[in-house]
Amino acid sequence: MADPVRPPNRVRISSRTRLFNDPNQQDQKMSFKSINLGTFNPFSQEWDHTQRKRLGVFIMCVLVGLASGSNYVYSAYAPQLATKLVVSSTIGNLIGLAGNLGVYLTGPLWGKIVDSRGQRIPLFVGGLCCLIGYSTVHAFYIGKIQLRSNLDSEPNQIKLFILEFAMFLTGCGGSSGLTSAVNATAKSFSNVTRASASGTVLAGFGLSAFLFSSLGNFFYNSDAGGLLFLLSIGTSIPMLLGSIFIKPIPPIEESINIYQPLNNQQEEEQEDEHEETNGIPKVIINQSQSEEFEYNNYSDEESQVRSRTSSLELTRSKSPISRGRHTQIHQNHHHAHFNDNLPPPINQSKSKPNHLRSTSLASLPPTAISYSPLDLMKSIDFWILFICLALLCGTGLMYINNAGTVTLALGRENQRIYDKAKIGGYQAKQVGLVSIWNCGGRIIGGVVSDFGKNKFGIRRVWFLPVVAVLFIISQISALETTHVQSLWMVSTLLGLAYGSLFNVLPMLILEWFGMRHFSQNWGWVAVAPVLGGNAFNLLFGKVYDSHTIGKIGTSDELFEGITEVVRKVLKRDGGAIPDDGKHDCLVGEECYGIAFKISTIGNLIALALSIWVGIRREKISKERKKLILASRGEIVSDEEV
């Protein structure tokens, strides 16, 4: 059968094409003389129409990213919302958790829709979700929707469900916005700039809470009602506009001249040479059938990975190396994925430093690995990362959702009456700090891990224990903080740790389990915060409620009596029912101390697990390197590896 028609000027890449560096096309560093103002001016003649469109799409994606992280601002209005609705801290945490559920549970669904249908539908639906969700919460806050029918009754469960579902919708909207924006950005930029462009969108997601809390503090003087109105407009409009204007602008197909196509005779000669003299291994992936694979490279218009059977060719064993010598090493490996023992790309530079050569021998590109979600569930490494994410992210969400409550507990200084505007300013400051350092952590974590890996050969997995240590320090700082003026240190450390966590974990999932199913695999891993966030937030609510006036009594009985009289008068006249103070906590850091002690223990467990998985991956990498070197005829000891 004849080959299908290919676009002109496209070099055909055989299924067995080898990857070589073209000496005639070395990377050239751009000199500063080649950069002028026109390079940065989209209206100059150096920019064509396609580049301007791509810039417009990128700006819209950043705006959508800023609108998508609004759930992190919940703690800025959570105490006021709980006070206005006269509900306990536990119920307040349940309301916040509904938003988190919307973010994390719907991620895999939105990813599948975006991959199959594009960005328009998810962005439009996401904008409506944010508009309806925040408008409903605002209606509850200003009293248009009453949570309880009378003063003495418990909250109406149906209306409470409506309120929680409204928060769930805000999370759904944020998840759809971020998924669509990152997807469009990744498809619009080449490999050279894709990471930076996508990182900017993710940084906008992290800055969302700071943006909205600052605007709310500026325009509405920290009034929760004004902030909720701002959120309903500010989150929905960018997504609705994005559904019209956001469409991927694929980059001009990058040159593939570094791939030198070989004719059939050359291919076979190259293969024989590599099999017999160079000793490039064909690693067993199924012991019973002695099947092996051969690493191949593909390229298509969208730079996407081919199916498992086309990107990794399965062949029958012909090499004596694969018979008996490495059977034990691979006996537990399933043929459906290639997790631990794949060979490196064939071309290895002899001028590389030893640690870089060692890293390249022991690691594989994500395109050479393919774990389906079902395969993922069978991996011990997946479950270790899942538990680490649940513990660490749960700790982060506990503080993020309750930063306003912690601020209130410290800022009121054991007094029933306090300056609400002053406390509101402190709350906005903590939310802003967490947001800024959440953004900074996503950037700094990536730069540091890339630098450590590329410069010193430090595997990315060893940055996970560093993140766990940051979480531990933040929790200890929270336990030692007794004044609201010092709370900035806790918010900074927590935000940095939280942002770094969401930089390191996705990269580990990509590197260990492959690119083909990355979105789905990460979506399943991201279910962990639902479990951890629920557990730690409910823990915080229970601990806080156990120290409230309604539980431990009040020293101001006269104030309580006056409040009760006013509540009855307002009820009779149809006025708003004020808070009776029973849900207030006046014992400072003791209001939440036990919760932070338990979260510290959870972080210590995550630290131990992260060290364990690091040791596991080191052993796997050493085995792979020994296998490759042995297949080349190089005998090495464990110390040399």
Image (tube, rainbow, N blue to C red):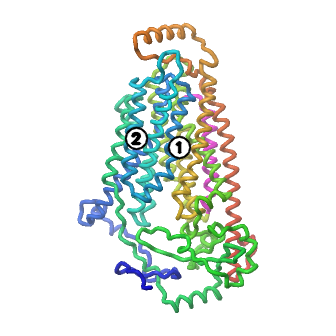
Observer-nearest residue: 547 or 133?
133
Q: CA distance from mark 2 to mark 1?
A: 24 Å
Q: Is residue 359 above or below residue 552?
A: below
Q: Is residue 615 above or below residue 123?
A: below
The amino acid type found where label 2 is placed reads Cys
Magenta stretch, overall SS: helix
Residue 638: x %, y % from top left:
75, 71
Residue 102's mark?
none
**Quarter of the image with the C terminus in it:** bottom right
Give the magenta range: 458-483
Callout 2: 10 Å neighbours few (<14), some, many (20+)?
A: many
Residue 591: x %, y % from top left:
61, 26
Residue found 68% across the figure and 45% down from its top: 604
Q: How many labels sit on residues?
A: 2
Callout 1: 10 Å neighbours few (<14), some, many (20+)?
A: many
The secondary structure type at the circle numbered 2 is: helix
Residue 489: x %, y % from top left:
55, 38
Residue at which label 1 appears: 495
The amino acid type found where label 1 is placed reads Gly
The secondary structure type at the circle numbered 1 is: helix
Going from N to C along the chain, the mark reached first, 2 or 1, is 2
Residue at which label 2 appears: 130
Relative side of 298 to 382, left or right: left
Q: Is residue 442 above or below residue 367?
A: above
